[in-house]
Image (cartoon, rainbow, N blue to C red):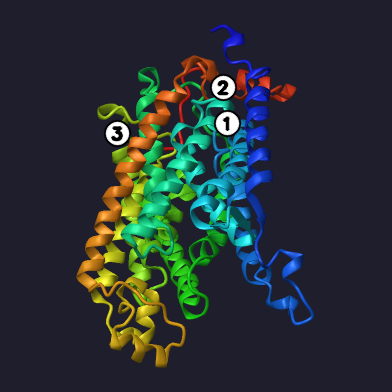
């Protein structure tokens, strides 16, 4: 392959320059501070410690660690693609957050012609960034940084519009993002990789292998994600007991999925040994599976069961479904995002629907109408006035029954999957443009294509048998 066809010397600086000019102009005209960051809004009655920074920044910091350290290390599992896995994650994440502040800001924080910027915007933008990075996992090793930036540029608007429509018009309960984050990211990524299908890679690639050190680094990423996942699931829940439950349920779900992953890994290995890919991925399934019901009164036992169920589905998906998708459906899911985010996301959504159907005032008390806000009586309903005597400031809702809310949850699931798949397919066709430096089949999973490599890299290449193959999934 002609080296100039994948050279970044002109493509990457030109694209970055264009994107930075667009961002700078848009920030200049449309972004200002919110009340908590605006000096003009402060006076001698202001209590500094009441600033939203002290409420939101700890969650922002935790999600930052997940995005840049957790995802970055996790994606460095390939022996000859560690630079790319970590650094392209760094590049893509940084741009995605900048871009999401604008796009999400227009839908969620736009007032009087301006996007009002505070730490809460950054948390929301990082969720959009997480969507992009999950989708990135489906095409890891088979795309250039130029393609990844274009993918992020297109995915953030697709996601933001879908999120806005689902939350504003369908109006669902989805505290942990099982619908709008995990399902969207999964099926968007699958749509992209479907279009970018490479038949020559179905039987593996000589450099699609791991190493002792790359697997250790990847497990380190898993540990960062595992430790901070309770913050991810609870950061946008209602403060107080709802957020408290979200932390508890996430930890319990992660714990049970971790124990189950070790057991399954040993049972399904013919020699009774553990497989590193299982530890790197399947242990995290519980964090996704509890997501849709994470702030509800589902009981600690249910959170534990969801962790076990999600882990089992994720494990079997890696073992049987991923090869089937590649061989039969032209979907080469490089990191198995359908297992960790798709299957577990569907289980989580089902559990959330069950929790909605079973929710009663006997279990929740009057706060049921805060957690399930759309079941709150509409304005003017005498019951709303009575509830406000118990919960001052309770917002009027839509008066939905449990069954009605469950049907809206189902509608949101199918709408999100459809929007994500269409967006992914459209993005995939854009990424096929020859000007975006797509690597040839022979150059996939190889840092050398895009990086100036240290000398010991070449000694590692020479040690690798040409028929060695040990992919992550």
Can you tell which mark lies on residue 79?
Answer: 1
Q: Is residue 417 visible?
A: yes
Q: Residue at x 40, y 24 (%)?
A: 429
Rounded to the nearest angstrom, the CA distance separating label 3 from label 2 is 28 Å
Q: Nearer the viewer, mark 3 or mark 2?
A: 3
Give the number of the mark in front: 1 or 2.
Answer: 1
Q: Position of residue 302 (x, y in %)?
A: 33, 72
Residue closest to the far left: 403
Indicate left or right for 115 with 181 as reference.
right
Seen from the viewer's position, the closer of residues 395 and 182 is 395
Mark found first going from the N terminus, 3 or 2: 3
Q: Which residue is mark 2?
A: 464
Contact flag, marks 1 and 2 (Cβ < 8 Å): yes
Residue denoted by label 3: 325
Q: Secondary structure at mark 1?
A: loop
Q: Secondary structure at mark 3?
A: helix
- Residue 330 in the image: state x and y as whole percent: 30, 27
Mark 3 Cα shell of 10 Å, populated few (<14), some (14-19), many (≥20): some
| Residue at the front extreme, as displayed | 112
- Measured Cα–Cα span from mark 1 to mark 3: 24 Å
Residue 273 in sight in this render: no
């Amino acid at each position: 392959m002609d080296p100039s066809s994948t050279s970044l010397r002109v493509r990457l600086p030109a694209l970055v320059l264009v994107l930075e000019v667009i961002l700078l102009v848009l920030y200049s005209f449309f972004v200002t501070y919110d009340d908590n960051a605006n000096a003009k809004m402060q006076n001698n009655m202001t209590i500094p410690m009441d600033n939203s920074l002290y409420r939101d920044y700890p969650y922002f910091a935790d999600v930052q660690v997940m995005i840049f350290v957790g995802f970055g290390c996790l994606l460095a599992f390939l022996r000859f693609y560690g630079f790319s896995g970590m650094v392209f994650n760094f590049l893509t994440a940084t741009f995605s957050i900048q871009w999401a502040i604008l796009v999400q800001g227009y839908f969620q924080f736009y007032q009087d012609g301006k996007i009002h910027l505070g730490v809460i915007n950054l948390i929301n933008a990082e969720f959009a960034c997480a969507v992009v990075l999950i989708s990135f996992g489906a095409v890891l090793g088979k795309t250039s940084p130029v393609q990844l930036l274009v993918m992020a540029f297109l995915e953030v608007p697709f996601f933001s519009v879908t999120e806005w429509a689902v939350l504003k018009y369908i109006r669902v309960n989805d505290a942990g993002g099982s619908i709008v984050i995990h399902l969207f990211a999964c099926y968007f990524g699958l749509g992209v990789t479907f279009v970018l299908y490479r038949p020559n890679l179905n039987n593996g690639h000589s450099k699609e292998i791991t190493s002792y050190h790359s697997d250790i680094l990847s497990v380190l990423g898993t540990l960062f994600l595992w430790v901070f996942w309770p913050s991810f699931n609870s950061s946008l829940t209602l403060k107080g007991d709802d957020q408290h439950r979200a932390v508890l349920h996430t930890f319990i779900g992660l714990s049970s999925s971790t124990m189950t992953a070790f057991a399954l890994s040993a049972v399904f290995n013919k020699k009774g040994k553990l497989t590193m890919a299982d530890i790197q991925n399947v242990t995290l399934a519980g964090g996704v599976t509890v997501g849709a019901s994470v702030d509800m009164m589902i009981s600690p036992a249910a959170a534990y069961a969801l962790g076990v169920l999600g882990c089992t589905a994720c494990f079997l998906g890696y073992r049987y479904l991923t090869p089937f998708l590649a061989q039969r459906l032209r979907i080469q899911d490089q990191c198995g995002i359908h297992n960790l985010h798709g299957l577990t996301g569907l289980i989580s959504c089902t559990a959330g629907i069950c929790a909605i159907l079973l929710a009663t005032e006997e279990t929740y008390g009057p706060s049921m109408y805060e957690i399930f806000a759309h079941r709150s009586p509409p304005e003017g309903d005498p019951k709303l006035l009575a509830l406000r005597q118990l919960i001052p400031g309770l917002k009027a809702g839509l008066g939905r029954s449990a069954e009605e809310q469950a049907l809206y949850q189902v509608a949101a699931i199918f709408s999100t999957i459809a929007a994500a798949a269409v967006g992914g397919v459209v993005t995939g066709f854009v990424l096929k443009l020859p000007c975006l430096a797509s690597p040839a089949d022979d150059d996939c999973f190889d840092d050398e294509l895009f990086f100036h490599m240290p000398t010991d890299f070449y000694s590692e290449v020479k040690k690798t048998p040409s028929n060695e193959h040990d992919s992550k999934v």
